[in-house]
Structures are given as structure tokens and as C-alpha cells.
Image (spheres, rainbow, N blue to C red):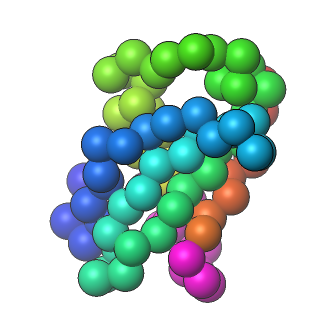
Amino acid sequence: MNQSILFNDDLTLDDKTSCWKMSAIVSGQIISIYFHSLSLSRLEEIDQCTKYDLEEVAELWLEDNELDGEEIHIMMKG
């Protein structure tokens, strides 16, 4: 796990975007991470295992992409 990323325990379904959202602190900056997925948007709650999977997806995204702003939108298949 990348120690410069701290995920907050605030994963919620965002009604405006119909996607799951969580916040994190990346190198001292608070960001919002949106997970766009049709199958995830149908869920009323996310279990702990799926939450950890989403954190890993966000970590991989941050390894491959440059953080630009306070929001990350991750498009997921399914």
C-alpha cells in the first residue's frame, strides 16, 4: 500500500452522479474519488472486501495518472 494515500472511511453513494464516492488524503491534499460503474451504482451498500478493492483501484489509478485538482473520476467496466 502506498503510504502517501490515506483513505477515509466515508464511502457513500452520490445521488447526483449515481456513483460511489470516497475521500482520501494524497500528499496532504484532500481529494474526492468517484467510481463510475453501472453494476456498483445498483448496490445499496458496499461490503468491506469491495471497499478494499476500490481503494486498490484508486491506488493503481494514482500510480498511472497525475493528480490534477481535487477530484478523480475512475471509469470502471461493469
Q: Where in the figure is residue 58, as x and y percent of width and height? A: 49, 53
Residue at image point 70% right, 38% down: 15
Number of marks present in the image shown = 0
**In this view of the protein, can residue 76 be seen by the observer?**
no
Assess whether residue 64 is covered by the magenta stretch.
yes
Residue at image point 30% right, 51% down: 8
Using the image, determine if residue 45 lies above or below residue 15. Answer: above
- Left/right placement of residue 17 relative to residue 9 reads right
- Left/right placement of residue 15 relative to residue 21 reads right
Q: Where in the figure is residue 24, as x and y percent of width and height? A: 37, 61
Give the camera-side residue of 71 and 63.
71
Dividing the picture into quadrants, the one containing residue 78 is top right
Q: Where in the figure is residue 71, as x and y percent of width and height? A: 60, 69
Using the image, determine if residue 56 lies above or below residue 5. Answer: above
The outermost residue toward the left is 3
Give the camera-side residue of 39 and 56.
39
Q: Where in the figure is residue 30, as x and y percent of width and height? A: 39, 73
Residue at image point 63% right, 41% down: 14
Where does the magenta region start and end? 59-70
Residue at image point 35% right, 21% down: 49
**In this view of the protein, can residue 4 be seen by the observer?**
yes
Assess whether residue 10 is covered by the magenta stretch.
no
Give the camera-side residue of 68 and 17.
17
Dividing the picture into quadrants, the one containing residue 16 is top right
Using the image, determine if residue 76 lies above or below residue 39. Answer: below
